[in-house]
Structure formats: C-alpha cells, structure tokens
C-alpha cells in the first residue's frame, strides 16, 4: 500500500507537470494563430471595376470621419453629430471581432471583415493586403485628403494620396483639434473627391476613464465641437458627410470583445443625396457606400451589400458586380479545402447567390473539419476520464475528495473572475494591449489560489470520509501527499474536457476562418488555468500534508446500541 501510494504520487506529479507544459505550449500556439492569421482571401485575383455608371449624384466630395472608440449611446449626446443624424440617415452597425482599432479601421476603409482582410490585432505590421478607398482613389487618379494618426501610413500607404497630415500619438494630449485644423487646410488647398479624417481622443478617454465616465462624455463633446468646425468649414451644398465609429467601450474602459456597447456603433450619413431614415447593418457595409458617393470604383474585397442610404440606386444594384466577383472567388477558396462532392452550393448567378453560397460552404467545411477533429477531441476527453478513473481505482475516497475540491476550485475562481472583477469571456476584459500580460498573470495567480483552496477542501473531505483518520506520518504519508496530486489532476482533467470541446469546434490552426471569440477567449483562459495549476503539482501535496498534520481530527467510533457518539483524538 505504501509503495503504491508513492508510485501514484510520483506518476501523478509527472503527469500534472506534463499537462501544465502542454497547456502552456498550446496557449501560446493558439494565441499566435489569431495574431498571425492572414487568411487566403486577400490573395485571390479579383478583376478591377470601373467607377459606377449610375445617374450622376449631386455629391462632389465625401468627408469621411472616423471617431475612434465612440459608443452609440454617447454619440447621441453630441449636438453637431445629432444635427447631421437628424438631417440624414441614422444607422447602427455591428463591428466584426476582434473589435480593435486596426482591424476595424481596415474594415471601414475596405469593406473587408477581419476574416477577409487578415487584420485581427493592433499588432499587425505592414500594408494591409486588401484594397482600400485610398487604393482605388490613387488608381483612378483622384486626389484624397487624409488627416489621421501616423499608423495610417504603415497600414494604408496614405502618403501616395498627396494631401496628407499624419499625427504622432501623444499620450495624455488632445489631438483632434490639430487633426481637424489640418484637414480643413488641406481640403481648401486641394480639389479632392474624398477627405478621410480620424479623430482619436474619445478612444483615449475610454481607456483612461471608461466608457460610462463623465470624462469620456466630456471628451466626446469636445470632439463634437471639432466636428462642427469641420462641417462648417467644408459644407458647401455638394459635400456629403459620413461619420462612423470603429468600436465602442465597456463602462470600465476596454474593447475587443462582443459587448453591445462595444460592437453596436454609430454610422451617420448626411448630404444632398442621402435619404432621411434609420437602419441597421454591419460595419463592412459602410466603405462601399463611401466609394460610390465619391465616384470611386467599387472596392474589390468588399463582401457585404452596401447600406442603402440613398434613393439614387435601387437596392442590391450598387457594386453588385464587384461583390459577385469577390464572393465567387471566396467561395472557391472555401470549397478548395473540401473533398469533391461534399458541398451543397450550386453555381451562383447573382451576388446574393454567391453570398448565400459562401455561408453554406463555410458551414459545410466547418462540419467536415469537425468530423475530422472528433477522434482527436474524443481521445483527449477519454484521457481526462482515464485519469479520473485511475484516481478512483486507487482510492474512491481520494476521487470524491478531489471532486469536491474541484467544485470549490471553480466556485472560487469564477467568483473572483465574474463577481469580484466583473470580467466576461471577452477581449474587452483587459483595458489595453499593454495590460494583456498582467491580465493573464493575474488569472494564473487566482487559479493557484483557487487550487490551494481546493486542496485544503479535499483534505477536509478526506478526513470526513474515514472512520479512523490517520495523520500523514509513516505509511500514511504518501497517501496524504498523493491526495494533493489527485486534486490537481482532477482540476486539470475537467479543464481538459472543456478544451477538448473547443478543439472539436474550432481546432488550433486558423487558416481560413476565425472562431467565435467569446469561446476562444474562454479556451485561452482554460489553458492559462491548466498552466498555472501545474504549480500545484508541488504546492498541492504540501497543502494536503499540512491539513492532515494540523487539522483537528474528529475520530468516529462505533456507537453503542441506540447511541451516537464521537470521541476526540489529539495529535
């Protein structure tokens, strides 16, 4: 018995440490898959499209303003933006995920979602691989005015446009006034079809003070005053204004996730060709409208139908040829990864057919890949169950005790995560990218704390299950130590079951589609916990030893007939 307990302790510790290392490795690989995702869509050959051949518009210039980090509810407290909204088209659009600046700026300028553009984080380097408004304007020989942060040159090569002002980021400084001043100056000096302006200060206030703060609202109104100056300077009866947000902020500050206040953002259109109305849509529907109003060719990578904000063009007609070409090409990309004859898609005839086919092919390929991943996921789940079964075969008391400890682990960890901190399974949980490491380190520390509580609880239950409990000395020492290891392995096994489900749904490699980021974030947290719990492979046995050594043991004795009696055994 003593030898078997020592063997169980040694083997269990080795397995727990191996699982911890595997979780750490998988967490890094999976995170990098998101950061480095590029997708196959931007690289496909797409035909160039001419400028739209529709009845001439009254609009001769579009002023496209992106207010970084502006929530929809707060936008309705901005007087000058509200005047534009009241005199034009008021849309609320849903962003893609991750709901971060670089990805969503790219969507606003190209009409391509994160899946298509391959821009998934603010760490993206180099020129985006999809066609933007700047690209089509330069290709058409049209002048563009750009006033924005310096990131626009790295991402979109805006210096080619000629009339450009780029601002360095200055932490704590208000930047929008200077950006607007230069946008007005450049617009007066140049005859441009398109003016692109990005105002960054609302986002800075959101990170600093939170999206529900007085400081955030005050900054939004200050930016609104600069917007009023821009509109006043450039409004001439033939200019259309488009004002959009890239993302919002949660109340405490932060974005990237799926919260309504983050992903439901304003898009306002006002000008001589804009109809009065309200509507909803998606963020990738804005850029095609801007291209049309500015008299530019349709954006080649845009996949969604444009928002219908003008009555000049029938619904569904605008940019349909370009969309049909893009969606048909994307459909072929998805189908190329499937066995012949496994898709339900027929040859598309219209852009709507191609869009429906793209969605069906995506569903079919995901289903086929999930079937392929099922054996791997079941093997991981079976390994987790085998660990639990091995613990139960060695000692049913240890399994029951470890199981109770594991329940307590999840109660403590979840209580800290959801109740104390108010977090969700969302990238918005950490306020900015520079806090990412601290956020995950904090979750690792809390996993260890919850694990220590679980080990102590397991020891307490273990004592309660024995009629004649013994202290962790002599032949009983390895059993007490192995109880800590059993608790660690039980926690890791239950985490492995959750990881197995995610791997079946989405896999590790992201080559053609992005996962549901709520579940992806939870998956990362599961792996972070699995990594941290490895430390308990050493600390857990110490806790169960100390609990067994110093716990006030209550020894159960057989009662006399008709009596119930407990006697105390002192250490």
Image (cartoon, rainbow, N blue to C red):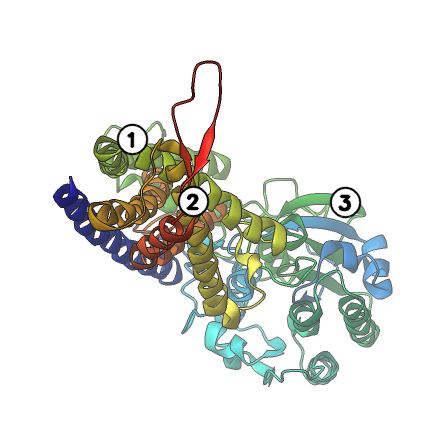
Sequence order check, earlier mark of 2 and 1: 2
The answer to whether mark 3 and mark 1 are in CB contact below 8 A is no
**Label 3: element kind:** strand
Q: Is residue 158 above or below residue 378?
A: below
Nearer mark to the viewer, of 3 and 1: 1
**Residue placed at 44% from the left, 34% from the top?**
567
Is 11 or 305 nearer to us in this picture?
11
Residue 327 numbered mark, or none: 2
Q: Earlier in the sequence, mark 3 or mark 2?
A: 3
Is 420 above or below relative to 340? Answer: below
**Separation (CA) of disc 3 from disc 2:** 27 Å
Q: Nearer the viewer, residue 316 or 278?
A: 278
Q: At which x and y percent is residue 496? A: 32, 43
Marker disc for residue 278: 3
Q: Secondary structure at mark 1?
A: helix
Give the residue at mark 1: 396
In the rendered structure, the answer to whether residue 105 lies left or right of residue 30 reads right
């Amino acid at each position: 018995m003593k030898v078997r307990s020592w063997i169980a302790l040694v083997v269990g510790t080795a397995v727990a440490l191996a699982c911890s290392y595997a979780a750490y490795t998988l967490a890094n690989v999976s995170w990098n898959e998101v950061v480095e995702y590029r997708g196959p869509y931007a690289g496909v050959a797409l035909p160039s499209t001419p400028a739209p051949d529709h009845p001439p518009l009254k609009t001769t210039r579009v002023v496209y303003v992106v207010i970084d980090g502006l929530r929809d509810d707060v936008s309705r407290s901005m007087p000058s933006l509200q005047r534009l909204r009241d005199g034009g088209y008021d849309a609320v659009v849903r962003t893609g995920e991750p709901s971060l600046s670089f990805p969503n700026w790219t969507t606003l300028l190209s009409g391509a979602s994160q899946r298509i553009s391959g821009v998934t984080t603010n760490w993206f380097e180099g020129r985006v691989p999809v066609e933007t408004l700047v690209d089509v304007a330069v290709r058409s020989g049209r002048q563009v005015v750009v006033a924005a942060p310096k990131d626009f040159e790295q991402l979109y090569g805006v210096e080619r446009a000629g009339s450009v002002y780029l601002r360095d980021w200055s932490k704590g400084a208000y930047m929008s006034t200077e950006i607007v001043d230069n946008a007005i100056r450049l617009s007066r000096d140049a005859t441009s079809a398109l003016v692109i302006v990005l105002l960054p200060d609302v986002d800075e206030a959101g990170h600093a003070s939170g999206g529900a703060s007085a400081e955030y609202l005050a900054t939004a109104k200050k930016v609104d005053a600069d917007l009023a100056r821009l509109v006043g300077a450039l409004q001439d009866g033939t200019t259309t204004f488009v004002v959009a947000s890239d993302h919002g902020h949660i109340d405490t500050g932060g974005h990237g996730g799926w919260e309504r206040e983050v992903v439901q953002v304003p898009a306002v259109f006002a000008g001589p060709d804009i109809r009065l109305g309200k509507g909803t849509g998606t963020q990738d529907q804005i850029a095609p409208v801007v291209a049309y109003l500015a008299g530019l060719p349709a954006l080649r990578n845009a996949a969604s139908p444009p928002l219908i904000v003008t009555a000049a063009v029938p619904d569904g007609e605008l940019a349909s040829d370009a969309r049909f070409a893009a969606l048909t090409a994307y459909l072929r990309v998805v189908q190329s990864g499937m066995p012949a004859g496994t898709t339900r898609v027929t040859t598309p005839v219209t852009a709507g057919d191609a869009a429906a086919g793209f969605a069906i092919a995506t569903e079919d390929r995901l289903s086929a890949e999930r079937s392929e991943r099922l054996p791997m996921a079941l093997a991981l789940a079976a390994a987790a169950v085998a660990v639990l079964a091995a613990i139960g075969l060695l000692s049913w008391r240890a399994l029951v005790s470890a199981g109770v400890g594991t329940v307590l682990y999840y109660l403590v960890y979840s209580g800290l995560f959801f109740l104390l901190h108010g977090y969700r399974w969302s990238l918005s949980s950490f306020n900015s990218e520079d806090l990412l490491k601290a956020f995950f380190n904090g979750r690792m520390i809390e996993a260890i704390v919850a694990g220590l509580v679980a080990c102590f609880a397991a020891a307490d239950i273990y004592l309660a299950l024995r009629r004649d409990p013994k202290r962790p000395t002599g032949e009983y020492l390895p059993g007490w130590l192995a109880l800590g290891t059993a608790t660690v392995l039980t926690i890791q096994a239950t985490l492995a079951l959750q990881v197995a489900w995610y791997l079946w749904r989405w896999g590790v490699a992201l080559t053609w589609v992005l996962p549901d980021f709520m579940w992806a974030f939870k998956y990362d947290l599961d792996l972070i916990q699995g990594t941290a719990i490895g430390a308990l492979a050493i600390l857990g046995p110490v806790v169960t030893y100390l609990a067994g050594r110093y716990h006030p043991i209550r020894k159960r004795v057989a009662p006399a007939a008709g009596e119930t009696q407990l006697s105390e055994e002192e250490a």
